[in-house]
């Protein structure tokens, strides 16, 4: 599916809006994400931290899980925005989120990342899931496929 400019803008908008709700009192690092489902719906997510640090959940997983909670299983695109002012190179999705993406998203699915510290997406990077996960542990490893008869 070709992603139109309008839909991409909507994804950036949703990721940015959801980032406003970031609960990140410990890292003060706000992240927003938005996924586009095969059905054309958009779900947002943001990072939610916890005093017990390990319980923190990233923006990307919150977005994907929100969609899955609403019955979605297939995804067309993901946008991630970081409030990255004065910080180094643009962030990339963490390993745990890459694994969750691998569960639901095709290797060719586009992933856009950008710095949103000025309110406008900057330093936009477009990659595919397979760029972030070249050797994935995917559902294929566990889900039996029917054996082809000769
Ligand atoms: N974080 C995300 O939300 N997504 C990522 O891909 C990287 C990290 C969040 C988790 C934590 O709240 C903060 O950023 C600092 O690690």
Image (cartoon, grey):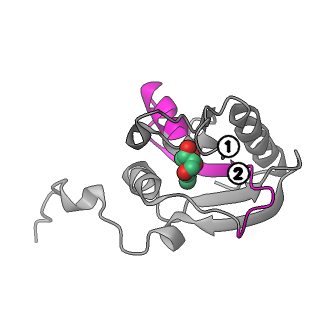
Q: Quadrant of residue 112?
A: bottom right
> In x, y percent, where is residue 68?
44, 33
Relative to 28, residue 142 above or below: below
Residue drawn at (39%, 43%) of the image: 54
Q: Which residue is identified by label 1?
A: 30
| Secondary element at image label 2 | strand
Residue drawn at (47%, 64%) of the image: 107
Q: Earlier in the sequence, mark 1 or mark 2?
A: 1
Residue 145 vs residue 136: left or right? left
Q: Which residue is identified by label 2?
A: 82
> In x, y percent, where is residue 19?
70, 37
Where does the C terminus fall, quadrant-wise?
bottom left
> In x, y percent, where is residue 67?
51, 32
Instruction: Answer whether residue 92 is magenta in the image.
Output: no
- The boundaries of the magenta stretch are 62-89
Proximity of marks 1 and 2: CB atoms separated by less than 8 Å: yes
Q: Name the one closer to the observer, 88 or 135.
A: 88
Note whether ligand 1 is within 8 Å of mark 1.
yes
Residue drawn at (60%, 42%) of the image: 35
Note whether ligand 1 is within 8 Å of mark 2.
yes
> In x, y percent, where is residue 90?
70, 65
Where does the N terminus fall, quadrant-wise?
bottom right
């Amino acid at each position: 599916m070709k992603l139109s400019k309008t839909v991409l803008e909507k994804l950036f908008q949703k990721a940015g809006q959801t980032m406003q709700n970031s609960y990140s009192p410990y890292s003060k690092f706000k992240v927003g994400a938005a996924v586009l489902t095969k059905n054309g719906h958009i779900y947002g997510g943001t990072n939610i931290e916890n005093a017990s640090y390990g319980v923190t959940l990233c923006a990307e997983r919150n977005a994907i899980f929100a969609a899955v909670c609403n019955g979605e299983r297939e995804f067309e695109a993901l946008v991630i925005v970081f409030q990255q002012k004065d910080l180094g190179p643009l962030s990339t999705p963490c390993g745990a989120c890459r694994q969750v993406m691998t569960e639901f998203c095709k290797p060719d699915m586009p992933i856009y990342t950008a710095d949103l510290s000025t309110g406008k997406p900057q330093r936009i990077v477009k990659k595919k899931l397979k760029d972030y996960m070249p050797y994935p542990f995917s559902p294929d490893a566990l889900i039996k496929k029917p054996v082809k008869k000769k």
